[in-house]
Amino acid sequence: MTTVGFIGLGSMGMPMAHNLLAKGFTVQGFDVRSDSVAALAVRGARPAATAAAAAAGADALVLMVVNAAQAEQALLADGALEALPDGSVVILMATCPPGAVTALAARVEAAGRRFVDAPVSGGVVGAVAGSLSIMAAAPVAVVERVRPVLAAMGGKVFHVGGQPGQGATVKTVNQLLCGVHIAVVAEAFALAAKVGVDLDILLEIMSGSAASSWMLKDRGPRMLHADPEITSTVDIFVKDLGIVLEAGRDARAALPLAAVAHQMFLATSGRGEGTTDDSQVIRSYHALNGTNQESRPEPPDRLIQA
């Protein structure tokens, strides 16, 4: 397996394609933005003018698009599936609802191609470093066939099940936990801010206590700034927690905490702040409580005893 078609050269897809090139794969890249295709070509990829051109002659076709609708558009409406050689493998790496993944896999396999459901975790940092966690679901033989492709982009490749949709379910659970953790950190900080607690001191205390979490340590510092560096946007969690709730409906599973977290991200996006860093969901809590990051209440004098 040497030639990889790659559709979706965004903030994560582009560095993932770079890592495939670095590992010696021939990459045929396509994106609706021609400048992204040109930028990848500078790194040695074959530029593709269409989704079908990216798939033509490829051993595997990676889809790192925004959602299931874009994956279906590229594969079916834009001809990538038909252009892909018989027996080649479609690797869907976008975050999509499990039900949509299962349905798309059935259409791919009915056309004589194989399908790997392989969403990722690790964000832009992981994509650049080639250290993504990849949650692959497909029969063992199919996963092993594409493992070199996956390993070029990820530090950990987990085989989570034999059926497409199982990888999407694992990613859904991951995003449920991430979204709720971010929202609850924001809620805790908002309570402290309301009564004038110094949030820098609060973060230091909580980071070393039983209340600590990876999200607290990563997003907490960014919540203390009005305009932090963006690594993942509010709108990503509007989308991903929406997928979580859809998966819950399909499984008849109640997800009340995910629903509340989704509403807080949605409120932030609704105010026109969807492209801010996801830590800025705290702005919705400040809005509810009448506080803000620029003018938090002054903390009371702290008594320091020797």
Image (cartoon, rainbow, N blue to C red):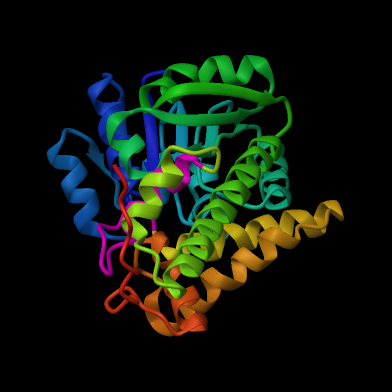
Residue 27 magenta-drawn? no
Residue in view at x 73 percent, y 31 percent: 163
Q: What stretch is highlighted in magenta?
A: 212-232
Residue in view at x 62 percent, y 51 percent: 176
Residue in view at x 52 percent, y 82 percent: 288
Residue in view at x 17 percent, y 49 percent: 38
Q: Quadrant of the C terminus?
A: top left
Of all residues, the one furthest to the front in this rendering is 306
Between 92 and 188, the one lying in front of the other is 188
Residue 1: % across, % down: 42, 18
Residue 173 position (above or below residue 269): above
* Res. 67 visible in picture: no
Residue 78: % across, % down: 48, 56
Residue 227 magenta-drawn? yes
Residue 142 position (above or below residue 283): above
Of all residues, the one furthest to the right in this rendering is 252
